[in-house]
Image (cartoon, rainbow, N blue to C red):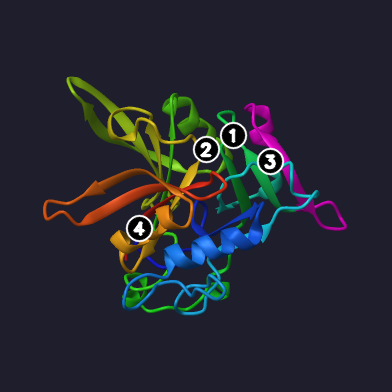
Amino acid sequence: MSAAFVTGVGAVVSADIAVPQHEREKHFYARVLSTGENPLWRAEDLMNNLGIPIVGLGARDDKLAHLPLQWMPHIQVADVGASVRRALELGGSAPMHATDNEGNSQWAVLVDPQGAAFGIIPVVPAEALPQTSPADAAAMGRIAWLDLTVPDAASTRDFYREVVGWSVAEVEMKNGNERYADYNMLHEDGTPAAGVCHARGGNAGLPAVWMIYLPVGDLAQSLRRVEAEGGKVIKAMQGAGGEYVYAAIEDPVGVSLALVPG
């Protein structure tokens, strides 16, 4: 997902969640995301630094209380209704499925058999996407990547291949003397859109939810703020020079996501 915004089957532009303790959560994300000399996210409304809405943080009410408490990426699919039907056939569920007055599917929230939640939307026309330059992609708030870590990555791979329409490329992995494959899930143009990983090696202990990767201006500062504002650092990785290159975190109400340098 190197381009800022991509259209087509399997592409992801945005994500949302409905949370309890909404004011506390807004404060947490405002503090954690708006770090560095040139923050990639606006503290006042959580839009990115170009004023584009990427992540939606809504208040959890009675109508939304049945949804999993997870960040849900919005994945573009060719036919929302067909994807909902296939998800149900494969053991998933559809806690929300919006249709128009004629019964045509508009969007849906799905939950896979492992319990990970995600949204599906129709393919977004290219002209409806925000217009940005190639340089913007490296210096703006966006969803830089997403992945899902589960005990049974092979069956999860197959679920998303059929429901979303992703194709698959194996990624060779090694854990001690054990060799195995994780999976890149490919956008219709063949570029990687997401990862499905085994809960082994460096991925052991990660929650079985879609982890959205959000870039920040100063990752070390963001991690200090995570803990100061009531969150938790699940796992952090540092480069050869000691700089942080990745962190999985948990917000104050238990929602997980990943932070990376912008």
The x and y percentages for residue 132 are 42, 78
Question: Can you say whether 155 is above or below 193 in the image?
Answer: above
> In this view of the protein, which residue sits in the foreground, 237 or 231?
231
The x and y percentages for residue 258 are 40, 51
Q: Could you tell whether 241 is left or right of 200 in the image?
A: left
1 and 2 marks in contact (CB < 8 Å): yes
Q: Which quarter of the picture shows residue 27?
A: bottom right
Q: Is residue 91 in the magenta section?
A: yes
Instruction: Return the residue at label 4.
Output: 224
User: What's the CA distance linking mark 4 and mark 1?
Assistant: 33 Å
Q: Which mark is residue 160?
A: 2
**Disc on the earlier residue, 4 or 2:** 2
Q: Magenta part of the protein: which range?
A: 84-105
Q: Which mark is residue 112?
A: 1
Instruction: Return the residue at label 3.
Output: 84
Quadrant in which the C terminus appears: bottom left
Q: Element type at marker 2?
A: helix
User: What's the CA distance linking mark 3 and mark 4?
Assistant: 41 Å
